[in-house]
Amino acid sequence: MTEPLTSIRNIGPAMAGAFESVGIRSAEDLRALGTDGAYRRLLEAGHRPHFIAYYVVEMGLQGRPWNDCKGPEKAALRRRFDALKDTAWDRGRSELEAALNAIGVVERRPPAP
């Protein structure tokens, strides 16, 4: 029997729906992929990057409340998120498009193959 995604702390129906849309259908799937692997799938499918959503998943996989992420740990997660976003979301965009995306101006589109 598989556990629903919502059995993981901090994962609600909206986040579960996003994960399900990219083939992550259970808590076991999410745990196996980890935060970076699961979030990469979302970005590669065209979901808009959102740092808070990223660290909410990380905290949930650790069984911690979402707002427990602070200080140096949060800064380290931000570096991981930015590196992931640079490779999975901004891939195939010009420098200008990537900069505009960073401030939320570029129209959402899937990354180039």
Image: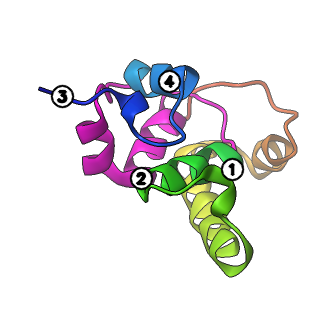
Specify start and end residues of the magenta stretch as a single range: 22-50
Q: CA distance from mark 3 to mark 1?
A: 28 Å
How far is disc 1 from disc 2 in space, using C-alphas? 16 Å
Q: Is residue 45 left or right of residue 31?
A: right
Q: For mark 4, what is the residue?
A: 18
Amino acid found under the numbered disc labelled 3:
Thr
- The disc labelled 4 sits on which kind of residue? Ala
In this view of the protein, which residue sits in the foreground, 60 or 80? 60
Check whether the beta carbons of the residues at disc 1 and disc 2 lie within 8 A of each other. no
Q: Secondary structure at mark 2?
A: helix
**Element on which disc 4 rests:** helix
Amino acid type, residue under disc 1 in the picture:
Phe
Badge 2 is on which residue? 61
Residue projecting furthest to the left: 1
Residue at position x 72%, y 46% in the image: 94
- Depth-wise, is mark 4 or mark 3 nearer the camera? 3
**Numbered disc in front, either 4 or 2:** 2
Tell me the chief SS of the magenta region.
helix
**Do tag 4 and tag 3 residues touch (Cβ < 8 Å)?**
no
The quarter of the picture where the N terminus appears is: top left
